[in-house]
Image (tube, grey):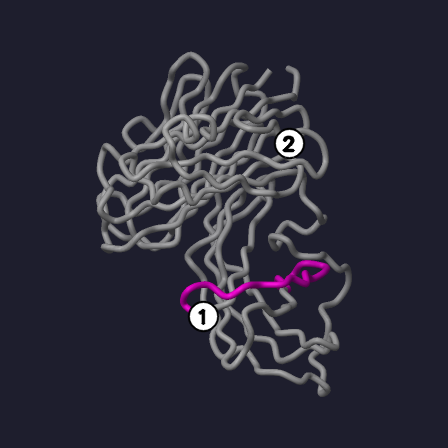
């Protein structure tokens, strides 16, 4: 089987309907992929298209972007836009001149092929700040520049390699601020739950930030659809993580569909997300990551609380495995 595959996003549909769409400038998309819309995403450093949504389709007006590529380090965990440094994490310096992290929280659980957002509270700080992020057991650390969100917290996105053999448990993540001179402040640690999920040729994960009921739908070549009501297909595809069904909150906030090695059929796959039921009464940000033989692309978006239900279902992307 040829390992090439091609993505198609909903950007062109957004433009045709007059919906605001955000084109995200991320890493290079998976090799052999092309995008649709105003520009095709090809080659290293190219722009990549995102999937958009409308208010009528359960979206927030298209606050959606996409990025992808190959992993930038050998460590199973990675920090978005972070610079990886091998060896022991930098030590706290007595010369550090700045405020310390007063609080560190996460948006939920982490699964292989998924992501989670860390929020660091640093009183009396500017709008951007540098941080060191280290995962216990990894040989290395990341340095990243984070920006404050609307709540005044610095947001750091942590992901886990889709091919990692993750087991249920938890990981310890340490985060420290870095001042203008490069001196490192005190580390704050947090335990993040790990939810193990399947690995294989094709893997799609949905991660979301609120304790609500979002559903992942993946339609495989031939028309078979995998979702909560039909969790497996004849080809071997499987929904192996299903979270917060009917607002029975488990706090996992992750869903996963995968095909084992050698099982994924050739042809077009369609990835959709549905805000099946609102459990919290607030908008919810989500990220969908598609991984094919170690290369990945992530699409992000938002559902408004009032747009939950069957009509919220939206296509995030489609891709062809050749």
For the C terminus, the quadrant is: top right
Q: Is residue 253 above or below residue 62?
A: below
- Give neighbour class at mark 1: few <14, some 14-19, many 20+ (Cα, 10 Å): some
Q: Percent x, y for residue 69?
A: 65, 38
Task: Name the residue rendered at 33%, 41% in the picture.
Answer: 59
Q: Percent x, y for residue 45?
A: 70, 39
Q: Is residue 220 magenta?
A: no
- Give neighbour class at mark 2: few <14, some 14-19, many 20+ (Cα, 10 Å): many
Q: Is residue 143 magenta?
A: yes
Q: Which residues are magenta?
A: 134-152
Q: Determine which residue is flagged by label 2.
A: 30
Q: Quadrant of residue 282?
A: bottom left
For the N terminus, the quadrant is: top right
C-alpha span from label 2 to label 1: 34 Å
- 261 or 281, nearer to the observer: 281
Q: Is 195 on the left-hand or right-hand side of 156? A: left
- 316 or 113, nearer to the observer: 316
Q: Determine which residue is flagged by label 1.
A: 152
Q: How many marks?
A: 2
Q: Is 306 on the left-hand or right-hand side of 53? A: left
């Amino acid at each position: 089987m040829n390992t090439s595959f091609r993505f198609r996003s909903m950007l062109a549909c957004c433009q045709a309907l007059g919906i605001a769409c955000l084109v995200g400038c991320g890493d290079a998309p998976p090799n052999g992929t092309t995008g649709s819309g105003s520009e095709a995403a090809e080659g290293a450093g190219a722009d990549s298209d995102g999937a958009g949504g409308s208010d009528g389709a359960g979206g927030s007006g298209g606050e959606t972007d996409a990025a992808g590529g190959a992993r930038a380090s050998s460590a199973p965990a990675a920090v978005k836009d972070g610079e990886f440094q091998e060896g022991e994490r930098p030590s706290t310096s007595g010369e550090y001149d700045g405020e310390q992290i007063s609080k560190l929280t996460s948006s939920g659980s982490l699964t292989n092929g998924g992501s989670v957002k860390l929020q660091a509270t640093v009183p009396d700080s500017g709008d951007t700040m540098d941080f060191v992020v280290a995962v216990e057991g990894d040989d290395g650390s990341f340095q990243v520049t984070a920006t404050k969100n609307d709540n005044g917290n610095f947001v750091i996105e942590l992901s886990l390699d889709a091919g990692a053999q993750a087991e249920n448990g938890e990981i310890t993540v340490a985060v420290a601020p870095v001042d203008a001179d490069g001196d490192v402040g005190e580390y704050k640690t947090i335990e993040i739950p790990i939810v193990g999920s399947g690995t294989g040729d094709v893997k799609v994960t949905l991660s979301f930030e609120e304790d609500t009921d979002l559903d992942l739908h993946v339609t495989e070549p031939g028309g078979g659809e995998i979702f909560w009501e039909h969790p497996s297909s004849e080809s071997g595809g499987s929904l192996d993580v299903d979270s917060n069904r009917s607002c029975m909150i488990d706090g996992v906030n992750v869903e996963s569909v995968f095909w084992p090695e050698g099982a994924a059929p050739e042809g077009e796959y369609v990835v959709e997300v549905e805000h099946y039921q609102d459990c919290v009464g607030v908008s919810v940000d989500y990220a969908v990551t598609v991984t094919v033989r170690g290369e990945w692309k992530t699409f992000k978006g938002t559902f408004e609380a009032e747009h939950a239900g069957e009509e919220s279902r939206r296509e995030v992307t489609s891709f062809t495995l050749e």
